[in-house]
Image (cartoon, helix red, strand yellow):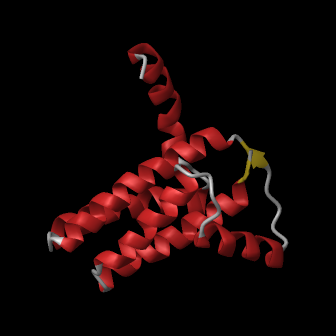
């Protein structure tokens, strides 16, 4: 289980960092997101963004219900791959394409941060069903 408000605070940070890529198109900003998503999505570890989010959650005394972590972890894994793609695109200076992919990440993270709408969570049941049929 995961606290939905902590997830929203992490998504807000991802949105802000992603927006900064439009001003500062440096591949290492997106590489930080790659590392953060990797730690949370694949290793189950606490990342810097999660630590900051938990601190804000505690300081602001936000109320949030516990939700199923499975779909959120799936969304983190998608965030990892999207951030990795952005990093590679910025590194090789395909900035226009990187900005388009960054815009997609901003839409997904912003939807979570501001509307508590997890796009990856909506895709998760279909992925889980397809994975079972393909025996992956």
Q: In the picture, which quadrant includes the N terminus?
A: top right
- Report the residue at 22% width, 72% height from top: 90
Q: Is residue 3 left or right of residue 111?
A: right
Q: Position of residue 68 (x, y in %)?
A: 69, 40
Q: Nearer the viewer, residue 61 or 133?
A: 133
Q: Is residue 83 left or right of residue 77?
A: left
- Report the residue at 60% width, 73% height from top: 48
Snapshot quadrant of residue 8: bottom right
* In the image, farthest residue toward the bottom: 24
Q: Nearer the viewer, residue 71 or 88?
A: 88
Looking at the image, residue 25 lies above or below residue 71: below
- Report the residue at 62% width, 52% height from top: 44
Snapshot quadrant of residue 87: bottom left
Q: Is residue 5 left or right of residue 49?
A: right
Looking at the image, residue 103 lies above or below residue 77: below
Q: Position of residue 60 (x, y in %)?
A: 80, 76
Q: Is residue 7 left or right of residue 33?
A: right
* In the image, farthest residue toward the top: 133
Q: In the picture, which quadrant includes the C terminus?
A: top left
Q: Position of residue 125 (x, y in %)?
A: 53, 28
Q: Position of residue 58 (x, y in %)?
A: 82, 73
- Report the residue at 43% width, 17% height from top: 135
Q: Nearer the viewer, residue 9 or 28?
A: 28
Question: How many numbered marks does the figure carry?
Answer: 0
Snapshot quadrant of residue 11: bottom right
């Amino acid at each position: 289980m995961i606290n939905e408000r902590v997830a929203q605070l992490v998504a807000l940070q991802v949105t802000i960092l992603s927006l900064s890529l439009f001003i500062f198109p440096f591949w290492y900003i997106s590489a930080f997101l790659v590392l953060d998503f990797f730690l949370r999505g694949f290793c189950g570890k606490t990342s810097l963004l999660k630590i900051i989010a938990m601190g804000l959650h505690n300081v602001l005394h936000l109320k949030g219900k516990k939700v199923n972590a499975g779909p959120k972890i799936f969304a983190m894994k998608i965030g990892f791959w999207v951030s990795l793609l952005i990093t590679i695109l910025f590194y090789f200076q395909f900035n226009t394409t990187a900005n388009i992919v960054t815009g997609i990440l901003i839409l997904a993270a912003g939807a979570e941060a501001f509307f508590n709408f997890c796009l990856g969570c909506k895709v998760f049941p279909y992925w889980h069903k397809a994975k079972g049929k393909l025996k992956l």
